[in-house]
Image: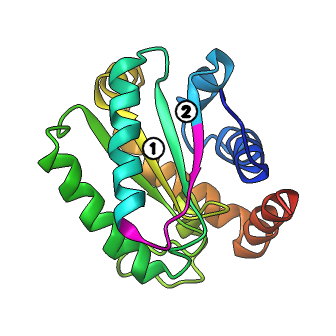
Amino acid sequence: MPHIQTPACAATRAWVERFVIAHNVCPFARRELVRDTIRCVEVGAERWEPALTAMVEECRRLDAKPEIETTLMLLRPGLEDFDDYLDFLDVAEALLVEQGYEGTYQLASFHPDYCFDGAEPGDPANFTNRSPWPMLHLLREAGLEQALAHYPHPEAIPERNIERMREFGAERLADELAALRRQAG
């Protein structure tokens, strides 16, 4: 990950390595980590406008730097409340469209308290989208489409991840996430 500037970004890299890749939550992450094409940036989100501006700036950075495949935007401090995060995510997605980035970049969402609509908060399946901190993951749609085209049965990835998380159990997964957060101090 180029530009690891903060302890939280270093811990996020560890999360990508020890959680996302180790549990094969995203079968495409290893390649990008090895290629060093993942950018991590920490953005304060106490006030939404500067954080949203930073998201648009990250889109422009991706436009200008094709060697960066994806950006992980850590939104801290701020947005610790999951409902607030979801409200922010709605605004961020609308802004992506407004700025003409629909079809170019996609937002994947991660939060320490992520809970799928209709799921119980304690369901281990939620850990597929839990991260050490509130985060927006800006993905290049072209890169994602290319990766999916060469992956057998990509539609099965979410169900496979849910099954795997349930096998591990919520307690183990929560402990792993907490350890990564402590790493950042």
Comes first in the chain, label 2 or label 1: 2
Secondary element type, mark 2: loop
In this view, the residue in front, 89 or 122, is: 89
Residue beneath disc 1: 157
Residue 44: say if magenta.
yes
Specify few, some or many for label 2: CA neighbours under 10 Å numbering under 14, 14-19, or 20 or more.
some
In the rendered image, the vertical position of residue 87 relative to residue 17, given as above or below: below
Q: Which residue: 49% across, 37% down?
A: 71
Specify few, some or many for label 1: CA neighbours under 10 Å numbering under 14, 14-19, or 20 or more.
some
**Amino acid on which the number 1 mark rests in the picture:** Ile
Q: Quadrant of residue 155?
A: top left
In the rendered image, the vertical position of residue 87 relative to residue 45, given as above or below: below
Residue 42 in view in this figure: yes
Determine whether, in the image, residue 52 is placed left or right of residue 2.
left
Q: Quadrant of residue 94?
A: bottom left
x, y percent for residue 118: 36, 81
* The C terminus: image quadrant: bottom right
Distance CA(mark 2)–CA(mark 1): 8 Å
Q: Which residue: 73% across, 65% down?
A: 173
x, y percent for residue 138: 41, 41
Q: Which residues are magenta?
A: 40-48
Residue beneath disc 2: 27
Residue 148 in view in this figure: no
Q: How many marks?
A: 2
x, y percent for residue 7: 79, 50
**Amino acid on which the number 2 mark rests in the picture:** Pro
Residue 119: say if magenta.
no
Callout 2–callout 1 Cβ contact below 8 Å: yes
* The N terminus: image quadrant: top right
Q: Quadrant of residue 125?
A: bottom right
